[in-house]
Amino acid sequence: MRQFILSIALLLSVAAFAQPGMRRGPVINGDLSVTFRAQAPQAREVAVDICGKVYPMTREGDRPWQVTTDPLEPGFHYYFLVVDGFRASDPASPHFYGTGTDASAIDIPEAGVDFYLDKDVPRGDVRLVRYWSPSLKTWRTAWVYVPAGYDTHPERRYPVLYLQHGGGEDETGWTKQGRTGAILDNLIAEGKAVPMLVVMDYGQAGDFAKILLEETIPTIDKRFRTVANAKHRAMAGLSFGGGQSWSIGLKHPEVFSSIGIFSSGMFGGVGAGAYAPFSVESQLPELLADPKAFNAAHDVFYMSCGTGDPRIEHTRKAAEALKAAGAKVHFTAWPGGHEWQPWRKSLHEFVQLLFR
């Protein structure tokens, strides 16, 4: 117990190295390696764990513990500090809810890729919406992206994208890790995307299909100036949320006319068991039986996956099977694994196709 308390105290002291005028948190170097420092003078061992790869830190005398990693792949990487065997998020860095817990993260830039960065363009808002769920008998929260000009043009109504997070994440993921606001702001300012609302709700609670269709959507249509019909409503998600987009979105063409599925395990491979009732194998024959009806019901049907994701080949085969049967499918394979950089790129491409 004494060692546990000591470890907590050591972790809290990590932020002490960030003195006024010094950069706070880890430093990204020119070769995309990252230098981490930790002020933990009484610790016996300190390390940084980046997505499962552990880098032991060293120190000289009374100087902070330090390590420089190998060059990292561009994208968003969760990490933890490990002090005498105790793992926790870094108090010197922002925290994000991912991997089922609050975690620190480092966002490695990708050369020539700036579509998710803040630019000097008209900015929308991301608004917190609280609403009562009769089915769960509790209050729920959703985050809603509202484009620039929403408040100054009260005569205008907007289409809506319902955008779901992955497993181990929550309704904050697409805003914080995914940079949805910046992506939409930039595209709308460039004239590449239709101004739209984006609703990001918590998807791992109760009967989510019932919550979404009977509670969330009516709430959004009541509180915001939406165009409340299927033609102007889309659903998309990453990983677990992609499976929900398949199982809910395809089942309800009277509600959603466009579907986006990013890196979903439902096509086979990692995590496929979670989607057994809604797998491609169980639904493909029905979909392929009438591809004309499928195409008529869906303005956009989009699938994507990272080339380093173990789900890639299963996703590619599902897309090819649908295309071979005559279904109109937009499929893109992005560089990267099961992480935010391919998902940001998927959102960036998908929203440009919507509501045309």
Image (cartoon, helix red, strand yellow):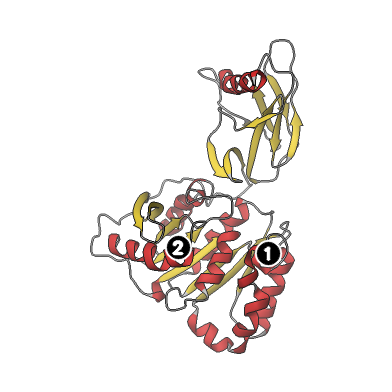
Disc 1 to disc 2, C-alpha distance: 24 Å
Task: Identify the residue at horizontal 62%, vertical 19% (top origin).
Answer: 10
Q: Position of residue 136 (x, y in %)?
A: 41, 57
The image shows residue 169, relative to residue 198, as above or below, that is above
> Is residue 193 visible to the viewer in this orientation of the structure?
no
**Mark seen at residue 273:** 1
Position of the C terminus, as image quadrant, is: bottom left
Q: Is residue 117 left or right of residue 310?
A: left
Residue 97 vs residue 228, the one in the foreground:
97
Position of the N terminus, as image quadrant, is: top right
Q: Is residue 100 left or right of residue 203?
A: right
Task: Identify the residue at horizontal 50%, vertical 49% (top origin).
Answer: 179
Question: Mark 1 and 2 residues: CB-CB less than 8 Å, in contact?
Answer: no
Helix, strand or loop under label 2 = strand
Amino acid type of the residue that numbered disc 2 sits on in the rendered structure: Tyr
Mark closest to the chain's N terminus, 1 or 2: 2
The image shows residue 315, relative to residue 5, as above or below, that is below
Q: Is residue 64 left or right of residue 204?
A: right
The image shows residue 205, relative to residue 85, as above or below, that is below
Q: Position of residue 350 (x, y in %)?
A: 53, 65
Provide the residue designation for mark 2: 162
Q: Position of residue 322 (x, y in %)?
A: 65, 80
Dot 1 alpha-carbon crowd within 10 angstroms: few under 14, some 14 to 19, many 20 or more: some
Q: Position of residue 306 (x, y in %)?
A: 68, 59
Helix, strand or loop under label 1 = helix
Q: Quadrant of residue 326?
A: bottom right
> Is residue 246 visible to the viewer in this orientation of the structure?
yes
Amino acid type of the residue that numbered disc 1 sits on in the rendered structure: Gly
Q: Is residue 123 left or right of residue 223?
A: right
Task: Identify the residue at horizontal 68%, vertical 64% (top origin).
Answer: 273
Dot 2 alpha-carbon crowd within 10 angstroms: few under 14, some 14 to 19, many 20 or more: many
